[in-house]
Amino acid sequence: MLDFTNTAEVLRVLRKRLTPVEQAESLIDTIEGHQEHARKAAVLLPFFVEDGRLQLALIRRASTLRAHSGEIAFPGGKVDPSDHSVIMTALREAHEEIGLEPARVEALGVLPPVFTVVSNYLITRWWRTCQPAWVGWYCKRARSMSS
């Protein structure tokens, strides 16, 4: 049984069980062969420790968007032609959406991509730990803005 209050143990298990970031593209290639017309996207699953507990940062999509307005989501989005990889996509999008600086995070690994039938996206999901002071500040700011 994993003790989620033991951050070091959780990080060790995640590093062991997740696919290394360097292999993200090969995971996509496996699924993309079955979904050759899928658009690529990537999301970041940023977690941090606050008050001794693991927290996961989420966003609420703007209510003015045409698609998925007001939904709770992970920071991320579609791959742009200028992105060198899906990992760069997730970093760029997280920076645009929540101001997360890539230097403030540590990549732990990726999960297998997920294909979304309705929107035709092949989404790469990857885990990162974030410096608690920054993410804690962001989350507190977001909570105060929504109150």
Image: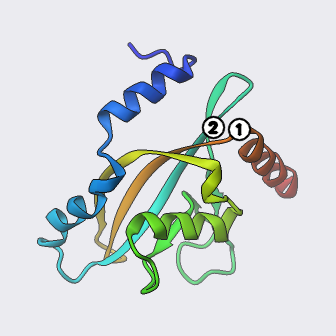
- The image shows residue 95, relative to residue 125, as above or below, that is below
Quadrant assignment, res 133: top right
Q: Is residue 115 left or right of residue 57?
A: left
Mark 1, residue position:
132
Q: Which of marks 1 and 2 is nearer the N terminus?
A: 2
- Asked if the residues shown at circle 1 and circle 2 are in contact, with their CB atoms under 8 angstroms apart, the answer is yes
Q: In this view, does 104 lie to the left or right of 122?
A: right
Rendered residue at 49%/72% (across/down): 77
Q: In which quarter of the image is the N terminus?
A: top left
Residue type, numbered disc 2: Phe
Location of residue 56 in the rendering, given as x and y in whole percent from the top left corner: 59, 42
Q: In terms of secondary structure, where does tag 2 sit? A: strand
Question: Whole-Å distance between the Cαs marked 1 and 2?
Answer: 5 Å
Q: In this view, does 132 lie to the left or right of 144?
A: left
Quadrant assignment, res 23: bottom left
The crowding category of the residue bearing disc 1, from other C-alpha atoms within 10 Å (few below 14, some 14 to 19, many at least 20), is some
Q: In terms of secondary structure, where does tag 1 sit? A: helix
Q: How many labels does the image show?
A: 2
Q: Nearer the viewer, residue 101 or 77?
A: 101
| Residue 48: mark | 2
